[in-house]
Amino acid sequence: MTLIDPAAQGSDRAAVIAEEAEKAGTDYIMIGGSTKVDPAKLKETITRIRARTSRKIIIFPGSASMISDNADAIYFMSLLNSATTEFLIAHQVMAAPVLKRMGIETISMGYLIFEPGMTVGRVGNAQLISRTDSEKAVAYSLAAEMLGMKLVYLESGSGSPTFVSEEVVASVSSSIRIPLIVGGGIRDPVGASKIAEAGADIIVTGTVAEKADRIYDVLKPIISALKAVPVAHPGKI
Ligand code: 1GP
């Protein structure tokens, strides 16, 4: 999946990223980030992206104000390792009635932030999990599954210099039955293959395309490398 932060560039550039990402083989466009964005800009960005790709668009909200009725779905996510309740449940309580009225598909997700965490770790007041702490990662992921969440997302933070260790990905992947998403710091084919081989069902990249001059040329080898890895859990997604 390709993550586009509507706060990071204009809607024209966002649409170009989505178009190039689709050509390179991405399966979904995620739109969101931790920086506040005007709802009108979010909506416009989604409209522009939709005009240039046929990929489904899922909102990856940084707050209860990142809601738009022109996306295909929205992650209804909880930052499970936050030290405060704001991103654990408070934004969800604010958003739920709005989403209900809107009728948009919500996909529940347990969101876990690992070191270094970057902006989202700071904004989310996360009690960062070590990138090698399989025991804690598995415990949180099992808790997400037992709470009825449909996805688990292991996040190192956008632009992170490292990603979650393969050991953590493998341990979580073999412990839960729900699909596992891994993102943050994945920027080359070798990294993407390692995470896919460790058992991630979905891999998210954002920064690598946002920073690229030749988006297709950067994304194509990454997506091809991870798609060459046999699907971790056929039928899970
Ligand atoms: C951030 O996991 C995503 O939420 C993507 O991270 O920008 O480092 O690819 P990058």
Image (cartoon, helix red, strand yellow):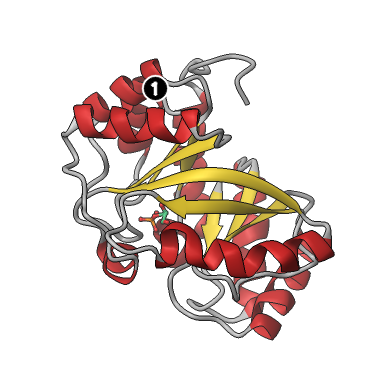
Residue 205 image offset from top left, x and y in percent: 45, 50
Q: Residue at x 20, y 27 (%)?
A: 135
Q: Residues within 10 Å of mark 1 (few under 14, many from 20)?
A: many
Residue 31 image offset from top left, x and y in percent: 59, 62
- Quadrant where the C terminus is found in the figure: top right
The answer to which quarter of the image holds residue 171 is top left
Q: Residue at x 52, y 68 (%)?
A: 5
Is 114 in front, or is 46?
114
Query: As shown in the figure, which amino acid type bears the numbered disc 1?
Result: Ser
- Do we see residue 69 in this rendering? yes
Residue 219 image offset from top left, x and y in percent: 49, 48
Is 160 in front, or is 124?
124
- The residue labelled by disc 1 is 173
Q: Residue at x 31, y 37 (%)?
A: 191
User: From the viewer's perspective, is 177 left or right of 114?
Assistant: right
Q: Quadrant of ligand 1?
A: bottom left
- Secondary structure of the residue carrying tag 1 is helix
| Count of residue discs | 1
User: From the viewer's perspective, is 19 left or right of 139?
Assistant: right
